[in-house]
Image (cartoon, rainbow, N blue to C red):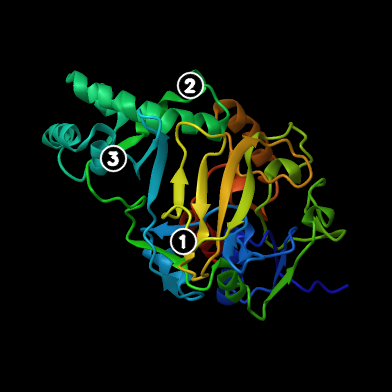
Amino acid sequence: MERTFDALVVGAGYAGAVCARQLAEQGSKRVLVLERRDHIGGNAYDCLDQAGVLIHQYGPHIFHTNDKRVFDWLSRFTPWRDYQHRVIANIPDNAGGRMTYPVPFNLTSLETAFGPKEGKRLGDKLLAEYGAEQKVTILELRQNADPEIAALADYVYEHVFVHYTMKQWGQKPEEIDPNTTARVPVFLSRDDRYFQDAFQGMPQEGYTPMFERMLDHPNITVELGCDALKRLDVSGEQIKVDGEVFDGPVIYTGQADELFGFQFGPLPYRTLDFRFETLPQDDFQGYGTVNYTVDEDYTRITEFKHLTGQKVPGKTTIVKEYSRAYTGAPGEIPYYAIINPDNNARYGQYKALAEKFSNLHLLGRLAEYKYYNMDAIAGRALDLAEELLK
């Protein structure tokens, strides 16, 4: 039977879709994209809920980058809505109520937490020591000889970082990597934006339409609801697809451990549970994302209308996000690789198996067992396609 494709891409998220488009367009390759889910876009997929609110089904995705090449490439498939993401922490105050301030912790946060007068005094001390618009880590602050500055580092650790991280990663304080703690910044600025990247925004019509345009090419065939591992065989010396040897490029964006039958044991991940609520009001929290850094079982609440700019009078949809260990049970999604030496060593065993096949390319968060922002994985996909087309 004649082969109808030159390249196989497993997964229709950022990694797979970007790579597929480049191979099809720049290399005139016939590309078959196999996607296990019933939709494209991976975890960036968005859709209208029953209330007509555009939601991100797998949690909030905010695009930001300093990579002009990536931004320009994606801009071929979507206009952008200017959106500067702002996040606030919602924590108990000392009077039985609650207070909010921007995160990352900055000069505005300082004056909210300690009062305008005392906060300004501490802020002036920090500015004199480190200079304006600097991001100073907890480690640097703790090492300062001034006990007030060291105490401020302890405040940020306790109120912004440690409890949130415990919820996110299921760890006790003593289990949290000290290197991670050391990198937590205090931003000596009144810039309340969560990101300072040159290019920020949301696809004007949503992520899904952007992916639809990306994959709309005569050389690309997408099959949804298709488990590629039932068609892809890596058990022998050569890759087989549908029972026949396939020597074209295979770009695999799924779990590396699953590809090889978990033969060295499963790689650990954190998964997320999302609880969506539609409320009969115009606005719930005033911001796209509010982090609960001290209390509550959930890590954050996202209100989508702030992200998308959508106007839906009298209705708003929020989602509460709960983190827990990934078990591999049906319906669970692995979101975050748990990076440590033992897990990296186990991943290395799977990577070594993949490297036996010259035409197999692991690409993306799951396949490479690491964290990528959206822009970074789009850039990696462009680089891989370029390499394959040489």
Percent x, y of residue 114: 25, 32
Evaluate whether residue 360 shows in this view. yes
Percent x, y of residue 214: 58, 73
Q: Left or right: where does residue 193 sit relative to residue 215?
A: left
Residue 124 higher or lower than 31, as above or below = above
Which secondary structure lies at badge 3? helix
Residue, disc 2: 173
Which label lies toward us, 3 or 2?
3
Which secondary structure lies at badge 1? helix
Give the amino acid type for the residue marked by disc 1 in the picture: Leu
Residue 296 higher or lower than 253, as above or below = above
Which residue is at the front of the view, 256 or 167? 167
Q: Of the residues under marks 3 and 1, which one precedes in the sequence?
A: 3
Residue, disc 3: 109
Tag on residue 307? 1
Q: What is the distance, in whole Å, between disc 3 and disc 2 at their CAs?
A: 23 Å
Judge the density around disc 1: few (<14), some (14-19), many (≥20) Cα neighbours within 10 Å.
Answer: many
* Quarter of image, res 152: top left
Which residue is at the front of the view, 372 or 29? 372
Q: What is the distance, in whole Å, between disc 3 and disc 1 at their CAs?
A: 22 Å
